[in-house]
């Protein structure tokens, strides 16, 4: 109880002190609002532009969550494929690494051209959201592939022997042994990917620029920068951080719920 | 090896006892020669207990014991009954829905034994199952294993490097030497059945232990 109270009150105190110091600095040096707005001005901007910023937030959140879902699905499937065939794994893994280590910002323009051509060819007009989604997906799916593959391959050797002794098929071993073993690894991958998907969505939006009628938070930041509306820039930044924290906490909660019955990371120590 | 026998393989570390068990179970192919068994390799005819309990941490005790049936999708009501009976036989009634992390080391080993017994195997292979347990738990599990053996009479092949354990449990002991791994002595243990606490303090037990120790010392000394 006491520990919990401290865990909340201590960071809140630090935050409050920081904001006070910030306000004091702005007042003491009489800083121009476009250099550094005071916390009150940021709060005002958050209040006044809240409605339109919220729309942008939902757009960015939509791209992030869709990319994360695609990363979970495709990343999981690739990992299963890798675990079934060592040959497939060693053939393709280097290219997945190359895709991962090449900075997204550098690939994004290319992707935007391609998606533009493809969607225009399909006669469906311009779909900036698809380009953003592909960008976010590329950064998000690697941790899921890497972690899940490691998890699927780390089943207890003796249990594998036992499964063979009782005549288990490959699929049965995958389903009853390898997948449950991989679950904690997979969930760690998902938690990392949640943060990366947001970064990917924002980075892609910086490159793609305006998304037609809909714009995400990243574009609002650029726009605020051009117009020297620094307070609004801060407000958008604040919402972006908040989104990242909420995504992380949600994924962490899901992970704990799934592992709470048996995994060391989620159970409280009991008699040994 | 006759049916219903309790044979211990006794030898120093690295003499290939565990490898022999794995070859018998069909898990490792022999590097030379072949392995002839009167027991067929139909899944479930052979039970295997490892040195570690080797349980699935995400499954309950019942689910772990049901594993041999779940693997071949045969876990119906009858199998459930058999699993519950096996859990009762190892003295874990009431823990069916516990998870392995909630159990002590000895209890986990019991779950592992119940899982090996649930298919009512003809041959039970035990690879130093009690080596990692404390002395009190170990003695208790020795007695429990003997009782299970008396009731169900599977053929048991028990790997150990404890002289006392092998004499107390077995009807026969094969002493194996290291490098090259050979059976260097084959001793019948003619202590009266059923064995219990009184057996451990009998002079016949002491004599037998001495005899087996001597055979083990010769097996180790001959090649080192």
Image (spheres, rainbow, N blue to C red):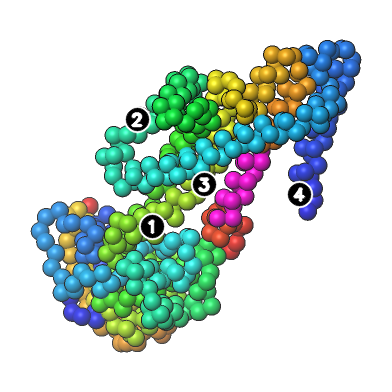
Span colored in magenta: A244-258
Between discs 2 and 3, the one toward the N terminus: 2
Residues at marks 3 and 4, CA–CA distance in whole angstroms: 25 Å
Question: Which residue, given by chain and number where applicable, does mark 4 sit on?
Answer: A4
Tell me the tag on residue A175.
1
Residue at (30, 70) in percent of width and height: B47
Tag 2 and tag 3, C-beta contact below 8 Å = no
Q: Nearer the viewer, residue A187 or B32?
A: A187
Q: Secondary structure at mark 2?
A: helix
Of tags 2 and 4, the one toward the viewer is 2
Between discs 3 and 1, the one toward the N terminus: 1
Image quadrant where residue B196 sits: bottom left
Residues at marks 2 and 4, CA–CA distance in whole angstroms: 45 Å
Whether residue B5 is visible, yes or no, is yes
Query: Please, which chain is the residue tagged with disc 4 on?
Result: A
Q: Nearer the viewer, residue A259 or A234?
A: A234
> Does the magenta-highlighted stretch encompass residue A247?
yes
* Image coordinates for residue B31, horizontal then vertical, percent: 15, 53
Q: Nearer the viewer, residue A171 or A256?
A: A171
């Amino acid at each position: 109880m006491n520990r919990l109270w401290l865990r909340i009150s201590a960071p809140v105190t630090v935050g409050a002190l920081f904001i006070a110091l910030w306000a004091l600095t702005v007042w003491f040096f009489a800083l121009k609002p476009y250099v550094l707005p005071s916390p009150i001005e940021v709060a005002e901007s958050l209040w006044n532009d809240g409605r339109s910023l919220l729309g942008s937030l939902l757009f960015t959140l939509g791209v992030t969550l869709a990319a994360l879902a695609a990363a979970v699905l495709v990343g999981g499937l690739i990992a299963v494929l890798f675990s079934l065939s060592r040959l497939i794994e060693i053939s393709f893994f280097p290219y997945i690494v190359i895709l991962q280590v090449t900075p997204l910002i550098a690939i994004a323009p290319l992707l935007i051209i391609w998606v533009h051509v493809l969607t225009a060819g399909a006669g469906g007009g311009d779909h900036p959201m698809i380009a953003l989604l592909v960008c976010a997906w590329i950064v998000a799916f690697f941790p899921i592939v890497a972690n899940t593959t490691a998890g699927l391959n780390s089943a207890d050797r003796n249990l594998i022997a036992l499964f063979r002794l009782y005549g288990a098929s490959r699929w049965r071993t995958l389903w009853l042994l390898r997948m449950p073993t991989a679950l904690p690894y997979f969930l760690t991958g998902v938690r990392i990917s949640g943060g990366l998907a947001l970064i990917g969505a924002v980075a892609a939006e910086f490159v793609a620029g305006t998304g037609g009628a809909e714009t995400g938070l990243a574009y609002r930041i650029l726009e605020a920068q051009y117009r020297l509306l620094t307070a609004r820039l801060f407000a958008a930044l604040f919402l972006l951080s908040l989104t990242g924290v909420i995504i992380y906490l949600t994924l962490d909660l899901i992970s704990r719920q799934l592992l709470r019955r048996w995994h060391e990371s989620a159970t409280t120590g009991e008699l040994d | 090896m006759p049916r219903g026998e309790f044979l211990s393989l006794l030898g120093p570390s690295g003499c290939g006892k565990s490898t022999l068990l794995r070859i018998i179970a069909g898990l490792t192919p022999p590097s030379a020669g072949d392995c002839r068994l009167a027991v067929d390799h139909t899944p479930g005819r052979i039970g295997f207990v490892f040195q570690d309990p080797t349980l699935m941490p995400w499954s309950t005790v019942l689910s772990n014991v049901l594993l041999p049936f779940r693997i071949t999708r045969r876990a119906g009501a009858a199998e459930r009954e058999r699993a519950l009976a096996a859990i009762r036989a190892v003295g874990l009634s009431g823990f069916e829905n516990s998870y392995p992390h909630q159990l002590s080391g000895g209890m986990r080993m019991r779950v592992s034994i119940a899982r090996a017994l649930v298919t009512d195997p003809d041959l039970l292979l035990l690879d130093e199952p009690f080596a990692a347990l404390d002395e009190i738990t170990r003695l208790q599990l020795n007695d429990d294993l003997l009782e299970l053996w008396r009731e169900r009479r599977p053929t048991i092949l028990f790997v150990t490097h404890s002289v006392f354990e092998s004499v107390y449990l077995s009807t026969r002991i094969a002493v194996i030497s290291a490098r090259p791994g050979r059976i260097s002595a084959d001793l019948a243990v003619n202590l009266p059945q059923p064995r219990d606490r009184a057996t451990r303090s009998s002079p016949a037990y002491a004599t037998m232990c001495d005899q087996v120790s001597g055979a083990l010392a010769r097996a180790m000394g001959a090649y080192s």
